Image: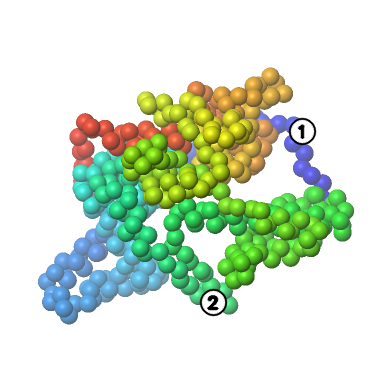
Amino acid sequence: MAKQSFAERWDLDPARREALQAVITGVATADRMIAQLEAMKAHFLAAGQAIAVEIMAELDPSSSYALPLRAIAADIATATNAADGTIRSRMNGAAILTTDFPATYTALSEGRISRAHADVIVDAGLRLDDERARARYEQVVLDRAESLTPGRLRPVAHAVAERVEPTSVVERHETARARRCTWVDDLGDGMSEFHAVVESVRAHAIQDRLTQMGLTIRRAARHEARRAYGPVVDDLAVEDGDPVDERTLAQIRADVFADLALTGHPTAQVSDATGGNALAAIRGSVQITIPAETLTGLGDDAAFLAGHGPVSPDIARRLAADTPTWARLFMDPDTGCLRTVDAYTPTAAQRRFLAARDEHCRFPGCRQPIHRCDLDHSHAHSEGGQTAVCNLSALCRAHHMLKHHGAWGLEHGRGGVMIWTSPTGRRITDRPAPAVRFMAELDATDPDPPPVEIEETAPF
């Protein structure tokens, strides 16, 4: 199999550009219509639950057993070929959306956000019991929702909820930590799902370590295949099976997890001569931003697990005490953009800065973590581009190739702002994740916020 050549760039001729613009417009229009239909469905599901609640209020609570709710949910379920338990869950979610998050419901009914965005906003804001705090949270997050994917919106929503939450992160973490547990769900066909509820830092470190071990096993298998079959193995994609080890990376991760939990060490399924014993040196890695006051014990503001959410101050301090390498960041107090990075141990300064500024791939919507990304020159080095942080950004391998060979353009603005130009000429701005969170948190803590006016919407 011959390798694909990327020697020549391609571009759209006027006819194809116009046709593709029509496709993009059509998809965007369909998405808005789907969002409006999702809002309509939420409206009716919430109305069904409201009828059930009214009936239950008229009955003897000791004998009702929520039968009206179950009966109405079952009626809807038979009309839509769904399970009645699923409908009860959707009715409850619809009631929460329409009642407790009216601004989010309005945005969904107008097609300005998708149902996935609405779910992110509701999930992160459910813990806010105070109505005014919840309204403030909605206002700040909705301002960002229309320009972020659901995946990128999630850490912003959690950061804003953290900022407006009246209960301290220490109290909430201790309450949540008390619920840590494991359980198994049987899937049939001899397979089961193993679940573990643990601290976020541990969970993501476990997943990262499993990934690194899996990649080491794949490299070892490929080395073995080269010895047996020659250089033809180099034409296989990473996702393809190797002649020695035909498992996918996801399958290897699952096998390594089981091996570690049951035996204490992974089974590489390759000989020691191929480098499989290098697994013992691999450790999981996570990136956490810790405020200086929290680090020194003078404050209890939440630390932040890059791309995911808040971390308990106590956990953050213990991690900082044990880590061999950590960096001090200086941020602009007005914009949240990083100014400089100062490290206590000598490392590559530019890599430290970019790891803190970018956190993940900078293509719009991509969240591939930075330690699996390339540091790309926005203005090509071969064309005189400088190797400087003002000309470097993190791009995963797929989007790195897309930028160079996929008719996409990239401008590197001030403060790490990336301005992408699509093949049809659309311009999309991608801002660094820490700056997006910082500005959202700043809005959430505005001592004199504008009044929140929420108009009840009944568009159906």
Q: Of tags 2 and 1, which is closer to the observer?
A: 2
Q: Residues within 10 Å of mark 2 (few under 14, many from 20)?
A: few
Quadrant for residue 163, please give it: top left
Q: Is residue 193 visible?
A: yes
Q: Which numbered marker is on residue 194?
A: none
- Give 349 or 115, whichever is nearer the viewer: 349
The reply to whether the C-beta atoms of the residues labelled 2 and 1 are less than 8 Å apart is no
Direction from residue 305 to residue 251 in the image, left or right: right
Q: Which residue is mark 2?
A: 188
Residue occupying image coordinates x 37% and y 60%? 177
Q: Which residue is mark 1?
A: 7
Direction from residue 417 to residue 457 in the image, left or right: left
Q: Percent position (x, y) of residue 101? A: 27, 49
- Give 444 or 294, whichever is nearer the viewer: 294
Report the number of discs: 2
- Give 425 or 417, whichever is nearer the viewer: 417
Secondary structure of the residue carrying tag 2 is strand
Q: Percent position (x, y) of residue 38? A: 36, 53
At label 2, the amino acid type is: Gly
Q: Disc 2 or 1, which lies upstream in sequence?
A: 1
- Give 289 or 156, whichever is nearer the viewer: 289
Residue with the most extreme top position: 384
Say above or below: 174 vs 412: below
At label 1, the amino acid type is: Ala
Quadrant for residue 256, please give it: bottom right
Residue occupying image coordinates x 30% and y 63%? 91
Q: Percent position (x, y) of residue 415? A: 48, 25
Q: Residues within 10 Å of mark 1 (few under 14, many from 20)?
A: few
Residue occupying image coordinates x 32% and y 59%? 175
Residue occupying image coordinates x 51% and y 41%? 365
Q: Percent position (x, y) of residue 317? A: 43, 46
